[in-house]
Image: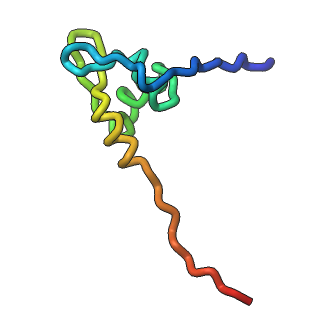
């Protein structure tokens, strides 16, 4: 049985609106880092070391754009620089 592939919506990142406190709801923050909101929930509950920093107000989860940018920077992997030998 084939699994149905979930289509992600393309989002114009420049139009992401933060609220007055600079917080982005989880549903809008997830597409910014190319994951589903469900993935962010799993990271928070099962793998907190993988999750980006978040703000919890009541039952609502929010992210700061600056925190997401810093989290992405920490995830950047630099490939090792190996010298190229010329034959």
Q: Is residue 82 left or right of residue 62?
A: right
Displayed quadrant of residue 4: top right
Seen from the viewer's position, the closer of residues 35 and 1 is 35
Q: Is residue 35 visible?
A: yes
- Return the x and y of residue 3 as percentages of the image width and height: 73, 19
Q: Is residue 48 above or below residue 25?
A: below
Q: Is residue 15 left or right of residue 2?
A: left
- Return the x and y of residue 17 as percentages of the image width and height: 34, 16
Q: Is residue 41 visible?
A: no
Residue pictured at 41% horizontal, 31% vertical: 43
- Return the x and y of residue 23 as percentages of the image width and height: 26, 20
- Return the x and y of residue 26 as percentages of the image width and height: 38, 18
Residue pictured at 45% horizontal, 27% vertical: 32
The quarter in which the N terminus is drawn is: top right
Seen from the viewer's position, the closer of residues 79 and 49 is 79
Q: Is residue 67 above or below residue 73?
A: above
Q: Is residue 1 left or right of residue 11?
A: right
**Outermost residue, bottom side:** 87
Residue pictured at 59% horizontal, 20% vertical: 8
Q: Is residue 24 left or right of residue 6?
A: left
Seen from the viewer's position, the closer of residues 30 and 56 is 30
Residue pictured at 32% horizontal, 42% vertical: 70
């Amino acid at each position: 049985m084939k699994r149905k592939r979930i289509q992600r919506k393309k989002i114009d990142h420049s139009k992401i609106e933060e609220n007055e406190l600079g917080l982005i709801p989880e549903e809008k923050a997830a597409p910014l880092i190319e994951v589903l909101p469900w993935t962010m929930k799993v990271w928070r509950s099962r793998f907190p070391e993988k999750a980006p920093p978040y703000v919890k107000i009541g039952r609502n989860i929010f992210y700061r754009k600056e925190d997401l940018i810093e989290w992405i920077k920490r995830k950047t992997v630099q490939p090792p620089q190996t010298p190229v030998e010329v034959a």
